[in-house]
Amino acid sequence: MEEVVVEDLFDRLPDSLIFIIFNSVSDVKTLIRCRSVSKRFNSLVPETESLSLRVDRVISSSTFFDDDDSSPFLDFFKSIVQSIQGLLNFDLGDDDEETDVQNCYSPGQILSGFERIRRLEIELPSGDLQMEKGVLVKWRAEFGTTLKNCVILGFRIGNSDEDSDSDLDLEQGMKTVVVWTISALIAASARHYLLRDVVAEGMERLVLKDAEGEGTLVMEEDGLREWSRSAAAEAEVEVGGGGDGGWEGRRTVLPSVRMRMRHQRKLRLESGAWIQSATLVVVRPSSGGGSDDVAVEEEEKGDGEMAMAAYGGGAYEDVVGALLKTRSYSLEMNSF
């Protein structure tokens, strides 16, 4: 009796169509699992160009770090390292589970199996800032080798019935704004440092954000190309505090910056809602790109474009629009 050979029609699909599917899936965990489906998938998955890495699992930190000294940013880095370890656990044998849990995996290591990354998005499980209840601070920063610009939005949930005497005075309000601004810049520089092993030649866009929507770091094609070809890229980062070479205190050095700030002690939105200490800060390097010679009017117009690009079309457009109509103040900050 003649044996009937059943043709696998899926094998007739061209590689180009498979790549479209993989790029649409994008999720790194799913794609890694797809490699076990067939030899063909195993060979094609590493060539996926659009990837999304979601860090959603945190395991005990006792294996990796000494918890005697802790800080928000140290906790942040602990979370990243341990979450990526958790992501990789499915691909490690059960027999070596006890040994494997002692290993740390960076984003660069987990993505090393992908050879043609063009677009990458990494989502962290939470934000980096630890603000008091009722305070919202959001930021969006663009980097190349170092900071290109950053837009920071912050406010407190207010009440129209509060007496003006209970509002923060101008001096205290400005101090609070400076704390918000520095905290956001440190968070952005810490995230940028984390990406030093992720950036690869040929990338077109890289986004690092968090599930809470607190901060977004973006590296566009020109910034990625700048960092990739810079032989001095490693010199742009410094290790602060943690002289033992640990994760704590590591971040990209920020250049001297010029900040254009808009601040209102109490602001009523078009919706009728009230907010306190409403603040919009646009940060640019003090030098480079001729930004020091830009007229105030043109710079303020640029502020509006960047702020709306960051928060326009969403829940915060009303806040940004109202703040852009207020007076702006210019501040300088040295490199740190």
Image (cartoon, helix red, strand yellow):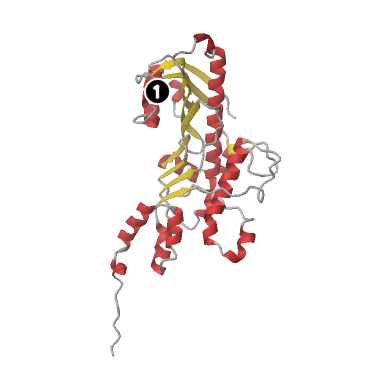
- Screen quadrant of the N terminus: bottom left
SS of the residue at dot 1? helix
Q: Position of residue 230 (x, y in %)?
A: 51, 43
The quadrant in which residue 79 appears is: top right
Q: Looking at the picture, how far across and down is residue 195, in whole percent?
A: 52, 44
**The one of 129 and 295 positioned closer to us in this rendering:** 129
Residue at 47 percent across and 21 percent down: it is 279
- Residue 199 placement, left or right of 248: left
* Residue 156 visible in image: yes
Disc 1 residue type (three-letter): Val
Q: Position of residue 207 (x, y in %)?
A: 44, 42
Q: Decide which of 77, 229 is in the foreground and name it.
A: 77
Q: Counting other residues with Cα less than 10 Å from the Cα at mark 1, is it few (<14), some (14-19), or many (20 or more)?
A: many
- Above or below, 141 relative to 258: below
Q: Is residue 232 visible?
A: no
Q: Which residue is mark 1?
A: 319
Q: Relative to residue 24, is residue 136 drawn left or right?
A: right
The quadrant in which residue 98 appears is bottom right
Image quarter (top left, top right, bottom left or bottom right) of the C terminus:
top right
The image position of residue 78, as x and y in percent, is: 60, 44
Q: Residue furthest front?
A: 161
Q: Between 254 and 51, which is closer to the camera in this rendering?
A: 51
Residue farthest bottom in this picture: 1
The answer to whether 105 is drawn above or below residue 176 in the figure is below
